[in-house]
Amino acid sequence: MTTNDHRASGTLTDPAADAAAMLLRLGFAIFALVIPSATLMSRWVIVVLVPIGAVLIILSSLLRADSARLSVRALSHLASGPGLACLLLVGWALVSLLWTPVRWEAAEKLFKLLGVVLLGFFAVIALPQRMRATNLHLITIGVALGATLILVGSVSALVGQPVLSFPPATPERIVILLSVLGWIGAAWLLIKNRRSMAFALMVLVITAIALGPNRAAFGPLAASLLVLALAWNRPEAAGRIVGLVVAAAILLLPFASAFGSQLGMAGLERWWQMILDEPLHFLTGRGFDAGNAARVIGVIGPELPVSLISDLWFDLGVLGALFFAIPVAWAFIAAGKLGYELAPATLAALSAAMTVALFDRNATQTWWFHGLAVFAIVLMSVERGRYRTLRPRAEINP
């Protein structure tokens, strides 16, 4: 049979394209379907699976002969304002290794963190410009499965007949992750015009959080619901306002500690006293991972609140906080421009994530950065799957 015969019969295929599609589907399935539920089984599942999924997505791009465009996209993103701020943050963290009290431990932790960030970044830009709906349905299944497992385990434990038993800390991690990913799953259903299913999915997630074995996700959930209400009709304006408010909260957090006694939180006042005692460290920070080391040896007592932002200030000072606040504000502003189907849910998810960063100790742990990589990849995949929902108008010939 000739080549023309193969083409005419529809059997001519591109093995590289088929392999790329398979790798993309496998990689995305890890992020959207496996992680939201499998993380319940072990605390290390997310740390192991995120690099595997990211590498599969990057390989799929290389098989599509997309390596040139991959480098162009990377350079264009890094040359933007938020990209330069991220580079400055990384550079400042590297420089701070010169004066951190735990240089070798800090260097190891920093390079591991940068590895996760780089893999997530290249996986995001390696995504194809158009994602298939069959792939994106996996996120709703994954979120629903994770929430159902939490719900079954919690309800069965409440009635005294536990059906599922999870390792310590894994339910807390999953409910925090679901407080972010749940909104993206609901947004995909809204894009597909399945409003009742989107509502049912979020009711399932909220119920799982409410009945879960801990209350870690209550704050992020409340913040996301508030922002969703603000952004529902005017997402672009809400994105600008919330982005500026969150950036201001990051930059002004140490000054809030000056009013610790008035707020009924003595730990915050103790933090402010530390700033006054060492004003130089207020500017430069004490070096990457210095906060964690200070807690280990007891310099920072348990009365001081711990979060990603408090550690950012302690480790990298005002410069680190500034370099971090810029891309955060940009992320909210950009999210507000994603359209009425996706923007409100994305702003809600970002608000949940930033609430964790501002107030929760989980955000200082390695698994949370892997969770943020999952969120970024799933979000951008949904954003690139909207093209099939816009049908062209029929042309009427005179």
Image (cartoon, rainbow, N blue to C red):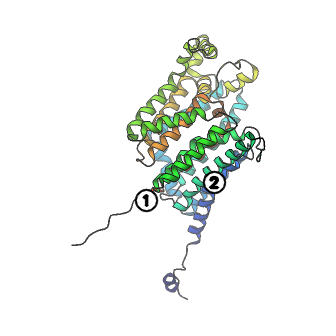
Q: Residue furthest front?
A: 159
Residue at 61% across / 47% down in the picture? 119
| Amino acid beneath label 2 | Leu
Residue at 74% across / 19% down in the picture? 298
Q: Residue furthest left?
A: 398
Residue 35, given in percent of the width and then of the height, sits at: 66, 49
Residue 176 can be seen in this image: yes
In the depicted view, which residue is nearer to us: 174 or 203? 203
- How many neighbours does mark 1 have within 10 angstroms: few (below 14), some (14-19), or many (20 or more)? few
- How many neighbours does mark 2 have within 10 angstroms: few (below 14), some (14-19), or many (20 or more)? many
Q: Which residue is mark 1?
A: 389
Quadrant containing the C terminus is: bottom left
In the depicted view, which residue is nearer to us: 276 or 170? 170
Quadrant containing the N terminus is: bottom right
Residue at 64% across / 16% down in the picture? 267
Residue 375 can be seen in this image: no
Q: Which mark is residue 342?
A: none
Q: Secondary structure at mark 2?
A: helix
Q: Is 305 located above or below residue 36 in the figure?
A: above
Can you tell which quarter of the image residue 285 is in? top right
Q: Nearer the N terminus, badge 2 or badge 1?
A: 2
Q: Is 262 located above or below residue 133 in the figure?
A: above
Q: Is 37 located above or below residue 137 in the figure?
A: above
Q: Is 283 located above or below residue 212 in the figure?
A: above
Residue 162, given in percent of the width and then of the height, sits at: 77, 44
Q: Are marks 2 and 1 in contact (CB under 8 Å)?
A: no
Can you tell which quarter of the image residue 276 is in? top right
Task: Report how far apart the C-alphas of labels 2 and 1 lie in the structure.
Answer: 22 Å
In the depicted view, which residue is nearer to us: 135 or 61? 135
Q: Which residue is mark 2?
A: 33
| Amino acid beneath label 1 | Thr
Residue 296, given in percent of the width and then of the height, sits at: 75, 24
